[in-house]
Image (cartoon, grey):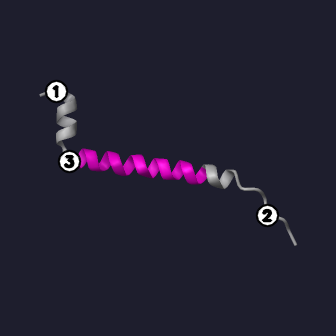
Amino acid sequence: MPLGQRIFDNVFILLLAGIVTMAVFYTLWRLLEVLSLSPAPLP
């Protein structure tokens, strides 16, 4: 059985890959958003 078919047939590997992908994507997105904020003016 080819490696690609074994990976796509394993539900747990697909679940783990989806969770890791979204966690990395949202973490990078939030970091870029926080870094692009302008400093708050002091009163």
- The earlier-in-sequence mark between 1 and 2 is 1
* Residue in the picture at 33% in, 45% down: 17
- Give the vertical position of 22 relative to 40 (above or below): above
**Going by the picture, which residue comes out furthest to the top?**
2
Residue 27: give x, y in percent of width and height.
Answer: 52, 52
What is the three-letter code of the residue carrying label 1?
A: Pro
* Residue in the picture at 42% in, 50% down: 22
Residue 35: give x, y in percent of width and height.
Answer: 68, 51
- Give the vertical position of 8 relative to 18 (above or below): above
The stretch in magenta equals 11-31
Residue 16: give x, y in percent of width and height.
Answer: 31, 49
Left or right of 16: which side holds 41? right
Task: Identify the residue position indicated by label 2 in the image.
Answer: 40
18 is within the stretch colored magenta: yes
Residue 11 is tagged as 3
Left or right of 11: which side holds 16? right
Do the residues under discs 3 and 1 have CB atoms within 8 angstroms? no
Circle 3 residues within 10 Å: few <14, some 14–19, many ≥20: few
* Residue in the picture at 40% in, 46% down: 21
Residue 3: give x, y in percent of width and height.
Answer: 20, 29
What is the three-letter code of the residue carrying label 3?
A: Val
Circle 2 residues within 10 Å: few <14, some 14–19, many ≥20: few
SS at mark 2?
Answer: loop
Do the residues under discs 2 and 3 have CB atoms within 8 angstroms? no
- The earlier-in-sequence mark between 3 and 1 is 1
Residues at marks 2 and 3, CA–CA distance in whole angstroms: 46 Å
Residue 2 is tagged as 1
- The earlier-in-sequence mark between 2 and 3 is 3
Residues at marks 1 and 2, CA–CA distance in whole angstroms: 55 Å
